[in-house]
Image (cartoon, grey):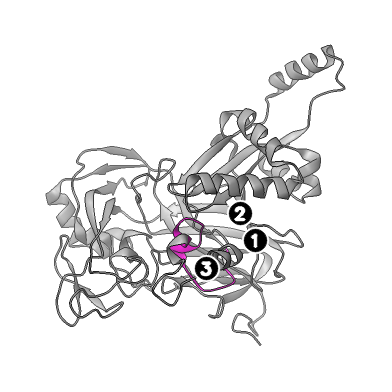
Amino acid sequence: MSLTESTSPPSQHLIVDRFTNGVIDPAKPMLGPLSDGGTMVARTAPGCWGPMITPCLQGGHEVTQPVFVEGAEVGDAVALRLRKVEVLSRATASGHDEVVAGHFEGDPYVNKQNPTTHQRRPQTVVEGVGPDAVRDAETGEPLHPFKIVNGYTVLFDEHREVGVTVDQRTAEAIGHKAQEYSAMPENAVQHSVLVFAPHDLVGLPVRVRPFLGQLGTTPSKAIPDSHNAGDFGSFLIGAPHEYALTQEELDEHRTDGHMDIDAVREGTILLAPVKVPGAGVYIGDMHALQGDGEIAGHTMDVAGQTTLQVEVVKGRTLEGPVLFPLAEDLPPAARPLTGAEREKAEQLARAQGLAGIEASAPISVVGTGADLNTATEVGLARAARLLGLSVAEIRNRATITGAIEIGRNPGVIQVTFLAPQDKLEAAGLLGFAREQYDL
């Protein structure tokens, strides 16, 4: 029996409240099993800044322990339906970062160290608030592989609908009660970034629109959670630590669960590849909001609760994630025609002697790579192979019936377009488009 198998009967409903050490490892035990069609409810910890300032964590996030899904085999896909995405934090902090020399070797997300003793991934404690609040538990030295160049602390309203960035006095008061305001889950080990109390932006109102920065399946080789994508994963190539990979290994094993695509929110359907038995579905890095590109490098990471329904899609091998966003999140050109628009288009087609207009539906294929150009080429090629079309045709469709959208700079994109329904049906995907867009 493998580490991921369980003698327990499959459950239709699973509560997930445990976390990884920052690495998604297919050799480690999974939770579950969860029945095909079952629901998991996950309490997630904040991503990015909290793990970034917690040296013992070996990745840039603290995602949930993967879940074994009954019937999911290598070469299948899993359809993940986001039923509910809820922010629990009352406040968070973030900002644009800069690495601090000496506090890491090779990769500040994975390989943090004490700059004096050179001990890797030391245990740390929090003393007070401010940029030096995280200290080595043995030596008392401040440890900060990252510093906030320009940052903010934001307080949310009771219903988590809006937020306002606060001044130094309030930021420090929140920092002294960081665990409470962050709603840090009991089993999380990260320090809350609220203890840094950044306050460069004051009085700026924001609109809360939560989504998941991490949602996907376990890679077929141990990969730090934040690096399970083509852009951050490139940091692993030739890295001076135990998770080093070649480019070929990264391309083979990653599942691109770290997307930071703001359309991965309540009501969305995401299909993810299965590269290990049981799929190993994991969740994390909930964001309260984000503009396309996450250009500051980080956004408002929060603790939250997600309800997710999982369906095994037998024999549907995927190279990476495929997304069916909410209709309102589609680029204008990719939204299904209204009844009036369709009627006008059909009249125009008939007037030119055509039998009718193409039956098409939206689809969004995720591409990742070391930079945006590479990610775009990856996404275009994945879409072409998925639907049996040429890359040239995908380029045309994304230009006139969709868009290339940036999930994260430097290298996560969506190729979103209207695809022929017969091609979607041949790919086993038409049912998801019909479900999502009421076709």
Q: Which of marks 3 and 2 is in front?
A: 3
Identify residue type, mark 2.
Answer: Pro
Tell me the element at label 2: loop
| Residue position marked by numbered label 1 in the rendering | 273
Residue 301 visible to the viewer: yes
Horizontal arrangement in the rendering, residue 106 relative to residue 263 (left or right): left
| In front of the other: 59 or 395 | 395
State if disc 2 and disc 1 touch (CB < 8 Å).
yes
Taking the spot 68% from the left edge, 41% from the top edge, the residue there is 391
Q: What is the x, y in percent for residue 423?
A: 78, 43
How much space separates mark 3 and mark 1, taking CA atoms? Answer: 21 Å
| Residue position marked by numbered label 3 in the rendering | 246
Q: What is the x, y in percent for residue 132?
A: 15, 65
Q: Which stretch is magenta?
A: 217-233
Taking the spot 19% from the left edge, 41% from the top edge, the residue there is 202
Residue density around tag 2, few if under 14, some if 14–19, many if 20 or more, within 10 Å: many
Q: What is the x, y in percent for residue 421?
A: 77, 39
Q: Quadrant of the N terminus?
A: bottom right
State if disc 2 and disc 3 touch (CB < 8 Å).
no
**Disc on the earlier residue, 3 or 2:** 3
Residue 63 visible to the viewer: no
Residue, far bottom? 1
| Residue position marked by numbered label 2 in the rendering | 321
Identify residue type, mark 1.
Answer: Pro
